[in-house]
């Protein structure tokens, strides 16, 4: 069993058979190394806990997560950047491996890296809103999307649709995301958690062994994506970060924030 860690970026409510795991990491719930470590530990621990029957992952009203904290990453040392991606890969692995019902209640904006967190869930319910967007828009800054994230996005949307959306740096509204299959329901923000709880209760009613075995059968492709050697991917990310153009773009990004 992994050593117990202090969870500081998540609020976890286990009053029911299922756990509500709420991201609580600053104003916009940015994805940081600590958040990823907390997610990795929490999903692994709950998967091993016989009292836990399922997970709802959510954020605050109108804010699921703004994605990777690019500013923090740009200011990090190469060693810190490498650790960030190690934790990201580890978190995605544990979230995909979670064998019980897992619903993502997307309560607001969830672009880029946050989209990938949501894609690990069995079922996604997204709240409507003018600023509530989901999708991968890294091409706006000529940023490379790591291979593992590309693979997960393509698994959910299909390679053709995912690649076309990435080329267009497309961010989907909740209704658009429903149309292309990126989410399963598009409802008013106030209804997201109610719908998520209704859905997970229905899945928990299925005999646990039947559910977990069937989940493993149906998600073989996704499990294969995360259950592989991360070292080559980490090496490629490190190489990309050394590219002079990428470094220049990061410097421009940091300069724009100062303004």
Image (cartoon, helix red, strand yellow):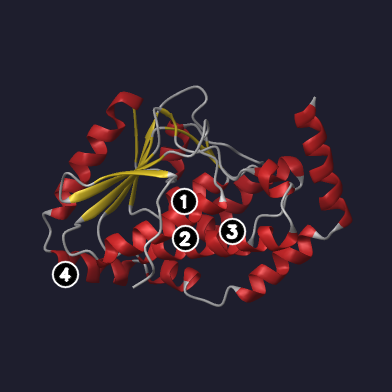
- Name the residue carrying label 1: 117
Q: Quadrant of residue 187?
A: top left
Cβ atoms under marks 1 and 3 closer than 8 Å = no
Would residue 170 appear left or right of 11 to someone viewing this image?
A: right
Q: Quadrant of the N terminus?
A: bottom left
Query: In the figure, 90 relative to 9: above or below?
Result: below
Q: Secondary structure at mark 2?
A: helix
Query: In the figure, 145 relative to 20: above or below?
Result: below
Residue at horizontal 74 percent and vertical 56 percent from the top: 77
Q: Secondary structure at mark 4?
A: helix
The residue carrying pointer 4 sits among few (fewer than 14), some (14 to 19) or many (20 or more) residues within 10 Å by Cα, namely: few
The residue carrying pointer 1 sits among few (fewer than 14), some (14 to 19) or many (20 or more) residues within 10 Å by Cα, namely: many
- Name the residue carrying label 4: 209
Of the residues tagged 2 and 3, which is closer to the observer? 2
Q: Earlier in the sequence, mark 2 or mark 3?
A: 2
Q: Secondary structure at mark 1?
A: helix
Q: Earlier in the sequence, mark 1 or mark 2?
A: 2
Q: Secondary structure at mark 3?
A: helix
Q: Earlier in the sequence, mark 1 or mark 3?
A: 1
Cβ atoms under marks 1 and 2 closer than 8 Å = yes
- Name the residue carrying label 2: 92
Q: Label 3 to label 4, Cα distance in Å?
A: 31 Å
- Name the residue carrying label 3: 150
């Amino acid at each position: 069993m992994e050593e117990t860690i202090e969870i500081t970026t998540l609020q976890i409510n286990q009053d029911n058979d299922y756990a509500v795991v709420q991201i609580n990491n600053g104003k916009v719930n940015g994805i940081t190394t600590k958040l990823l470590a907390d997610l990795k530990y929490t999903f692994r621990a709950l998967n091993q806990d016989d009292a836990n029957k399922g997970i709802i992952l959510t954020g605050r009203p109108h804010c699921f997560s703004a994605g990777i904290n690019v500013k923090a990453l740009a200011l990090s040392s190469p060693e810190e950047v490498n650790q960030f991606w190690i934790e990201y890969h580890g978190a995605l692995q544990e979230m995909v491996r979670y064998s019980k019902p897992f619903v993502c209640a997307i309560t607001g904006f969830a672009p880029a890296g946050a989209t990938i967190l949501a894609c690990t869930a069995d079922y996604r319910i997204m709240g409507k809103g003018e600023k509530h967007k989901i999708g991968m828009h890294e091409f706006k800054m000529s940023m490379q999307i790591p291979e593992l994230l590309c693979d997960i996005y393509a698994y959910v949307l299909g390679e053709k649709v995912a690649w076309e959306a990435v080329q267009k740096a497309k961010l989907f509204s909740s209704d658009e995301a429903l149309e292309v299959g990126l989410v399963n329901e598009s409802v008013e923000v106030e209804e997201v958690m109610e719908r998520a709880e209704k859905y997970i209760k229905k899945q928990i009613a299925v005999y646990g062994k039947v559910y977990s075995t069937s989940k493993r059968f149906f998600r073989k492709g996704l499990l294969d994506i995360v259950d592989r050697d991360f070292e080559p991917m980490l090496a490629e990310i490190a190489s990309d970060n050394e590219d002079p153009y990428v470094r220049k773009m990061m410097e421009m990004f940091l300069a724009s924030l100062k303004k």
